[in-house]
Amino acid sequence: MDWRDTPGRTDPMVSRLTTLIGGPVGRHAMIGRARFFTPVRAMLLLAVVFLAFGWFTKAACIQQAPMGPAGELGLDWSDNRQYVAMCYSDIVPLYGAERLSEGAFPYKTSWEEPGPDGQMQTRYMEYPVVAGLYQYASMRIAKAWDATPWLPGGLQVALYLNVVAWGLALAWLATVWATAMSAGRRVWDAALVAASPLVIVHAFTNFDALTTAFAAGGLLAWARRRPVLAGVLLGLGAATKLYPLLLLGPLFVLCLRTGKLPAFYRTAGATAVTWLLVNLPIMLLYPKGWAEFFRLNSERGADPDSIYNVLHSFVGWPDWAPSTLNTVSLVLFAAACAGIGWVALTAPRRPRLAQLAFLVVAAFLLTNKVWSPQYSLWLVPLAVLAIPHRRALLAWMTVDALVWVPRMYYYLGPAHKGLPEQWFTVTVLLRDVAVVALCAAVLWQIRRPTADPVRYGFIDDPVGGVLDQAPDTPPSWLPDRLRPAHQRVRQPKSSEWITASGAPGS
């Protein structure tokens, strides 16, 4: 029997879908012998199609119309087009709000705007360094494009969106490729990364595709037993958005269980050095601009998509100050990580890296005060590698993508016939329930490793790298209650102590 997974034969949903292209692969097909149209290339082509759909969902927000007093062309966001057409993207308003339209260098340039309390405050670029410099480079390309007479013209902000989208599309293709290469025998699982409904909605909502590319690349490098390269990629990802740092937690716990801590130290060290080298020049030259990302995140309140806002919309609490909310979310996330760590150390068989990575990132999003809609892209490659159940994944992705619809109409407000807040927060709650259900599925398979379809024959953990096939050799100082059951010291019963001492009845 061929060891490769063929979903056209084994998955009823995929088998029905293949009828559109001639049915599932034949019994005598020469699987794995294609020279050009390989599964990875087929998935990259599929990703291009879905990325094109994603661009069209944002295209309505870069339409131009006579907006000036003398009929000058400008960006047409009249009558709340960005919400009615559901084409909103942070990329468009940030071009002006971050002073990129003026050619300003991020972190150096500041401006004044009203804060949450109504008082004027000094603002800077609000993104980590790699994301900020990516925006600056895209702006420079857009301005050069606009200044070149033989290229098709348009509004600068429209050219800017196209330049940014081109780079984000390449980043998502890299995410698809890295996930497919990490999936092992289940390479076709990565088709859900290429064809996720979340790609259509959020690939170009913000800059998170850059981060998923670094994170997926870091996991692939770890799978290929290159811990330093994994650290470099995770460090670049953390300098784009901080979430790749969360992947170090699962690596530490699994390396602790298997006695592979030197490999973890190389990855963690490379992550820290890379992050520092990228951030240090901006940190030294423009310390206030560099710190803006951290200041803004510490002072902002609950995001509309957070569980705290869901509770507040239904019962009127919690109405906490940002400092209290920061503490509560941190404590809840730390408790979740402690529980995940306990599961990882005591499970009957070492969990797969992707399983723990998904649990940690999901716990972060569920407990955090901010869940911007595009953050769901973080979960897509991790979920595909962690959960070998395509219908469950597609159901979650569809629910998560559809949250965008009530979100846009909630932002319209009652004055413009928008939706009431609870219509939006109910869909957020459904999204959270779907993510919790996926977490429960992962925990169930961790406790019952024989039910995990990813582990097949000689395959243990496709993303494990040095952890793959590694026996449990935790350090001697690790408490007995944090060891797998088969390694715990059996405490003798009192009757056994009497027998061993030679007392009457021996």
Image: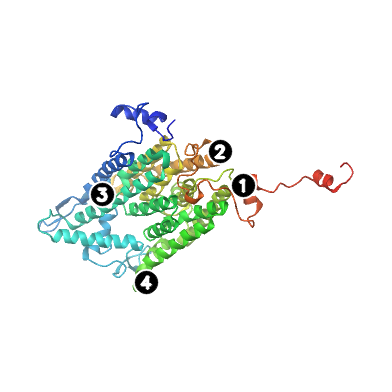
Circles 4, 2 touching at the beta carbon (< 8 Å)? no
Residue placed furthest toward the bottom? 285
In primary-sequence order, the first of circles 2 and 3 is: 3
The residue type indicated by label 1 comes to Pro
Q: Is label 3 in a helix, a strand or a loop? A: helix
**Where does residue 506 sit, x and y in percent of width and height?**
86, 42
In primary-sequence order, the first of circles 1 and 2 is: 2
The residue type indicated by label 3 comes to Gln
Circles 4, 1 touching at the beta carbon (< 8 Å)? no
Distance in Å between CA atoms under marks 4 and 3: 34 Å
| Quadrant in the picture for the N terminus | top left
Label 3: few (<14), some or many (≥20) within 10 Å?
many
Label annotation for residue 484: 1
- Between marks 1 and 3 in the image, the one whose residue lies nearer the viewer: 1
How many tags in the picture? 4
The residue at 41%/43% (across/down) is 183
Distance in Å between CA atoms under marks 1 and 3: 53 Å
The residue at 26%/49% (across/down) is 82
The residue at 38%/52% (across/down) is 217
Q: Is label 1 in a helix, a strand or a loop? A: loop
Q: Is label 2 in a helix, a strand or a loop? A: loop
Distance in Å between CA atoms under marks 4 and 1: 47 Å
**Where does residue 424 sit, x and y in percent of width and height?**
38, 44
**Where does residue 219 sit, x and y in percent of width and height?**
42, 51
Label 1: few (<14), some or many (≥20) within 10 Å?
many
Residue nearest the viewer, comparing 214 with 134: 214
Residue 404 location, quadrant: top left
Q: Circle 4 is placed at which residue position?
A: 287
Q: Circle 3 is placed at which residue position?
A: 82
Q: Is label 4 in a helix, a strand or a loop? A: helix
In primary-sequence order, the first of circles 4 and 2 is: 4
Q: Circle 2 is placed at which residue position?
A: 448
